[in-house]
Amino acid sequence: MSVRGEDAAFEADSMQAGYFREYLNGERAELQRTLADHINRLEACLKGGSTRLVSHHRGCIRAAENELRFVDRMLARLDSRFPRKADR
């Protein structure tokens, strides 16, 4: 492949990486909202003395934290492979 073709391919890959970066950032924001909601609900359960849903909310918090870590790892790998234009 010519240098020009390689540049075009890299630019196309970078554009696609930008799309996925935006998508993953949206997923991350949604997970953060979900996490905050479950933390608030857990705190309300504990303050109100209702222990029936405590384990449910703790499980949801752990799941959201795990998903956030997974999304963060995907974003880090994407950034290492395709740095943002401002980072170059």
Image (cartoon, rainbow, N blue to C red):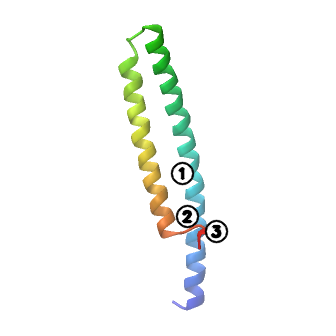
> Which residue occupies the foreground of this view, 9 or 42?
42
Mark 3 or 1, nearer chain start:
1
Residue located beneath label 2 in the image: 17
At label 2, which amino acid type do we have?
Ala
Q: Position of residue 25 (x, y in %)?
A: 57, 50
Q: Which mark is residue 24?
A: 1
Q: Which mark is residue 32?
A: none
- The answer for how far apart the CA atoms under marks 3 and 1 are is 19 Å
The local secondary structure at tag 1 comes to helix
Residue 42, relative to residue 79: is it above or below?
A: above
Q: Residues within 10 Å of mark 3 (few under 14, many from 20)?
A: few
**Is residue 84 toward the left or the right of residue 56 in the image?**
right
Q: Position of residue 84 (x, y in %)?
A: 59, 67
Q: Are marks 2 and 3 in contact (CB under 8 Å)?
A: no
Residue located beneath label 3 in the image: 86
The local secondary structure at tag 2 comes to helix
Q: Are marks 2 and 1 in contact (CB under 8 Å)?
A: no
At label 3, which amino acid type do we have?
Ala
At label 1, which amino acid type do we have?
Leu
Disc 2 vs disc 3: which is toward the camera? 3
Mark 2 or 3, nearer chain start:
2
The structure residue drawn at horizontal position 56% and vertical position 39%, both measured from the top left corner, is 30
**Is residue 36 toward the left or the right of residue 60 in the image?**
right
- The answer for how far apart the CA atoms under marks 2 and 3 are is 14 Å
Quarter of the picture containing the C terminus is bottom right
- The answer for how far apart the CA atoms under marks 2 and 1 are is 10 Å
Disc 3 vs disc 1: which is toward the camera? 3
